[in-house]
Amino acid sequence: MSTLVECVPNFSEGRDKVKVDAIVAAMKMDGVYLLDREMDADHNRCVITIVGGREAIQEAAIRGVGRAAELIDLNQHRGAHPRMGAADVVPFIPIEGVSIEDCVAMARHAGEQIWKRYQIPVYLYEAAATMPERQNLENIRRGQFEGIRDEIATNPARRPDFGEPRVHPTAGATVVGARKFLIAYNVFLNTPDVEIAKKIAKAVRFSTGGLRFVKGAGFLVRGLAQVSMNLTDFEQTPVHRVFEFVKREAARFGVMPVSSEIVGLIPKKALEQAAEWFLQVENFDSSLILENRLSAVMGGKMAIGGFRAGVEPFVEQLAAPTATPGGGSAAAASTAMAAALATMVASMSRGKKAYLQYERELSAAIARLATLREELKAAIDADAESYNSVMKAYKQAKESANADGLIDAALKQATSVPLNVAQRAHEVAEITEKLKPITNPNMKSDLTTALALARAAIVGALANVEINLESLKDTVFAGEVRQKAAALQK
């Protein structure tokens, strides 16, 4: 199965196109595709978006960091955006056929190579963080290049995850991590008073009491005050809610938004959410969009022959005399169907007069179930791929001095996939239970079916977990997983 990973490295250069071209050129290689590049002179920063397979994109990112180190001198760098490295931050984002755990492993590999090749110390953040206080990028970057340079050798909290406690003399330090898709969203105000933007940013960001999954700061950009934000989970806190919040806060200071911008790319779903919100379309669904419907039809998802045409290939693959797809994939598919049924029930109650008082709960359930559904669909193939990796490890072990290590690494991944499925099935079941009293009682049979599918998936997924644990040599890992499995079984 193919894998697709997104990487969005941020480099501390937004004014010299020749340098940015050189960095992009360094990342060009087979299997890696450039989706977008943004340069901002005020921030003096560029954001490059690339996608590719797991191995290729790691190497591309590493090479980009090395080229940036050759071209950018932070001692001379000035810009509105905080920075600590020539290659400031390098996040890996799962798109298809990979999990966030896979991206964590990629981040750690890239971090280790960046130090070995270029002598640039590396800090790990978000899902790859080795300590809780490093999950947030702003904690690591506090004091910027100069502050870190002065403290890295004397302050234990500043010690990098990879490398010696010293910054690269011109390239500083780099932060590498794994995260979900992030939307970089900025709102411009009709005032040059940057203090107003800073106050609004303080109100909107979660760390100071604002909206969940929002980070924010205020800058002066192109002569206007800008509220610069990162939306780390747009399904939980959508773009339209953030814009309305900024607009309301701006009014308190007698100003208003004049425009907004997206830095990098934005998922189509985020714009669909905004359209639904601002247009107030009743019972809106993405399938109402012409291009989405065409894509589904042309892709065979709604082929002539009804719903059977879509599900039959998978069912027949399960019936085939091959090891994959097997029970783990079936458990993931069952949970995805459970999440889909629960979404249907919540969507058909949301917006109806009898359930307006539950609008917030229903919207939250729909958003979370959408995320779970996508993760579970990816897990259908990921489970089969993890089994294939185990078989490959057994073959490689015959010619390796580290046979147990190779097999254990593959078995751990093969264990993690169904464990994640079981955890998500448990969450789907919990959400479904909460929907019972706040949705149309005429649809209780759909919720009952969803619960049955989710509970069956937990049993099946955990059976796959246990069978992999039986062959593991790492008893500590096995014990930890069995504790998690026992909690889910209860």
Image (tube, rainbow, N blue to C red):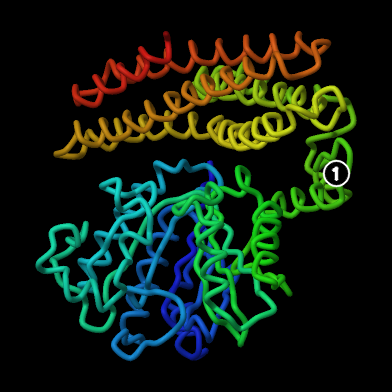
Nearer to me, 404 or 428: 428
Q: Residues within 10 Å of mark 1 (few under 14, many from 20)?
A: some
Residue 122 placement (x, y as % from top left): 26, 63
Residue 281 at least partly seen: yes
Q: Secondary structure at mark 1?
A: helix
| 136 horizontally vs 227: left or right | left
Coordinates of residue 439 in the picture (x, y in percent): 76, 19
Which of the image's four quarters has the C terminus? top left
Vertical position of residue 287 compared to residue 490: above or below: below
Judge by depth and name the residue closer to the eye, 62 or 221: 221
How many discs mark residues in the rendered view? 1
Q: Is residue 4 visible?
A: no
Work out whether 47 lies above or below 333: below
Q: Residue at x 70, y 65 (%)?
A: 251
Q: Residue furthest left?
A: 154
For the point 68% across and 51% down, the residue is 241
Q: Position of residue 74 (x, y in %)?
A: 32, 84
Q: Residue at x 53, y 65 (%)?
A: 50
* Residue pictured at 27% horizontal, 71% vertical: 173
Residue type pointed to by label 1: Arg
Q: Position of residue 474 (x, y in %)?
A: 20, 26
Q: Quadrant of residue 336?
A: top right
- Circle 1 residue: 293
